[in-house]
Each structure stands twice: as structure tokens, then as C-alpha cells.
Image (cartoon, rainbow, N blue to C red):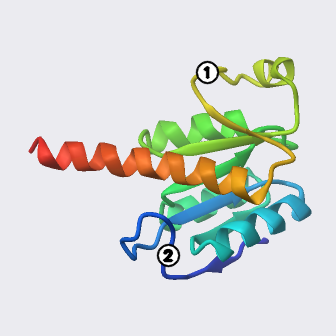
Amino acid sequence: MIWRDAWLTRSGSSGRGLIASVLVVDDEAVVRRVTYRYLNDAGYRVLEAEDAEEAMYVMERGRPDLIVLDVVMPEVNGVALASHIHARWPAQRILFMSAHNDQVLLESGMELGRDAVLDKPFTRDELLTAVESILAAQRAKASEKSEGE
């Protein structure tokens, strides 16, 4: 089993000093390590999993704020894993990453336009912008919900 966890104080653009956690799921070790490094260096708490089984193991021990998930993986693809995760944790935020064209994504079961997709290869800035955008929307939604109570 290959999974790593780094605890850091969040020092990103939110300025709140919060720790945001991100689970990176990709069967390619190089992609996982680069993604890990980009997020870790930006101050996120980063966990890694190389497949669906490891991802579910990590999820059982504590849900991350966001999952960065490869679409095309052996055995269980990212879309099937996301469906399984959403069946148990409907509010879980997921950012898909893929090096494949729209046809491959559609064939894997992805609903284009509904799911956030980061094209591989991506730059550090593209990854961090996508992650922060999703987390900011999640914070805004949580804030609206707490104000309405």
C-alpha cells in the first residue's frame, strides 16, 4: 500500500491559517509525486493513493476537503470511483484530471460540463488555481449555509 500524508499549516490565498486537505489518486507514480509536491509546497495537507482501493482506505479514515482524481486507471476508473465515493459521501468535492480527449471521458461515464476536469499535463499554477477555485466555492457554500441557520 502506497499512501503518504503531509501535515502543514495552510498558508494559501484564503489567509485563514486553515489546513485544507487534498487526496491525490493516480496510478502513475510520477504524476502523483509532482501533484503532491505542488500541493504540499502550496501549504495543503496532501494524501496519496495509487488506486481505488487505497483511496477508499484513506477516505474511511477521514475525508479530505478535495480529491484530485485521475479518470483513466486500471481496474476501477476514476468516474466509477467517484460514483462510489458520492454514494457514501454526497458532498465530497472532486477535481478530475485527464490526458484524454472528450470521447474517452464520455466513454468512461463522465458527464462533461458537470465535473471539473484539469487537463494533463498541467502546470503548477493551473493545478493550484483549479484546487483553490473549488475550495473557495466550497467555503462560500458552507458560509451561506451557516448564515441561513
Residues at badges 1 and 2 in contact (C-beta under 8 Å)?
no
Q: Quadrant of the N terminus?
A: bottom right
Q: Residue at x 86, y 23 (%)?
A: 104
Q: Which residue is mark 2?
A: 11
Amino acid type of the residue that numbered disc 1 sits on in the rendered structure: Gly
Q: Is residue 148 left or right of residue 65?
A: left
Q: Position of residue 18 (x, y in %)?
A: 40, 73
Earlier-in-chain disc, 1 versus 2:
2
User: In what element is the residue under mark 1?
Assistant: loop
Q: Residue at x 61, y 21 (%)?
A: 113
- Rendered image: mark on residue 130: none
Extreme residue in the left direction: 149
- Rendered image: mark on residue 113: 1
In the image shown, does 138 or 82 lie closer to the viewer?
Answer: 138
Relative to residue 115, is residue 21 depicted above or below?
below
Relative to residue 13, is residue 126 depicted above or below?
above
In the image shown, does 25 or 44 lie closer to the viewer?
Answer: 44
